[in-house]
Amino acid sequence: MTQTTTLPGGTYRLGDFEVTRFGYGAMQLAGPHVFGPPRDRPGAVEVLRTAVALGINHIDTSDYYGPHVTNEIIREALHPYPQDLHLVTKVGARRDEQGGWPQARTPDELRAQVHDNLRRLGLDTLDVVNLRMGGLQEAEPGSIAEAFGALAELREQGLIRHLGLSTVNAEQIAEAQAIAPVVCVQNFYNLANRGDDQLIDDLAAQGIAYVPYFPLGGFSPLQSDTLTEVADRLGATRMAVALAWLLQRSPNILLIPGTSNVAHLRENIAGAALALDGAAVKQLDALA
């Protein structure tokens, strides 16, 4: 890849490799509600190929997206993978016949999910596997040692290069770190939902990446009005402002906005490069 310097935010060292801070989240490549096949599979393939052509080398996925659909499309679009392309997947849930997301965190379930990801992506080793805990937006208290320990064993076997966590709190991160290194944490966070502010700073000091999801999720009407006002003043979209704010928030933040449309992909990349002035940052920070 020759265009990574054109992506906003530059790169970040994730474990033993460099990833673009502006990545791509593949969840939306599946059908409606992340269930079943996409309406436009060739279009999904085109989005992935365009992302890589534009220099993105960090793609976030999971075999329970679809289920299986997203990983199968990634393999169709990009295999054999460029040497510097890094796929980050997650385990800890499955899909039922109604499209629900029941937990799947026993050691046997986690081992099966790792092997499913390997098989469908066509890999011998997964670059990063995130253990998904908690609910949709918040961590659930309790030990994660048994589940994380099962993944640490697979890492020792060479099936996983690096381990991460998703929807966890500081205590659970510390518990995991006593078992094996953690290279990234993926939690719900945006400029209106700032519960992880201290956690982000603590992780930055340790050289651990923080990957927020739902950059526009959970806004109140008043917060949405403020975001719209800032975006209009800057001549930008709401998503551009949200993504740019995240990139400027901390150097350890990695973005994984998703889309199934090439035009939206290009728009997100351009938007994240937006320079927010002091007045805009002050107004946006007040949303929390």
Image (spheres, grey):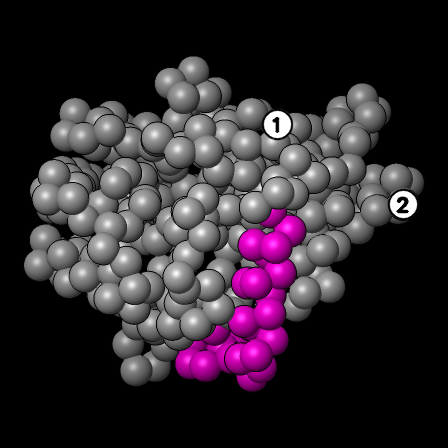
| Quarter occupied by residue 92 | bottom left
Residue corresponding to mark 1: 249
- Amino acid on which disc 2 is placed: Gly
Asked if residue 175 can be seen in this view, the reply is: no
The answer to which of marks 2 and 1 sits earlier in the sequence is 2
Helix, strand or loop at mark 1: helix
Mark 2 crowdedness (10 Å alpha carbons): few <14, some 14-19, many ≥20: few
Q: Residue 146, relative to residue 79: is it above or below?
A: above
Query: In the image, what residue occupies the spot 43% across and 72% down?
Result: 76
Query: In the image, what residue occupies the spot 10% across and 44% down?
Result: 157
Quadrant that contains the C terminus: top right
Residue corresponding to mark 2: 235
Q: Residue 205, relative to residue 83: is it above or below?
A: above
Residue 287 is covered by the magenta coloring: no
* Magenta highlight: main SS: helix
Q: The magenta stretch spans which residues? A: 30-55
Q: Is residue 237 left or right of residue 184?
A: right
- Residue 177 location, x and y as percent? 22, 27
Helix, strand or loop at mark 2: loop
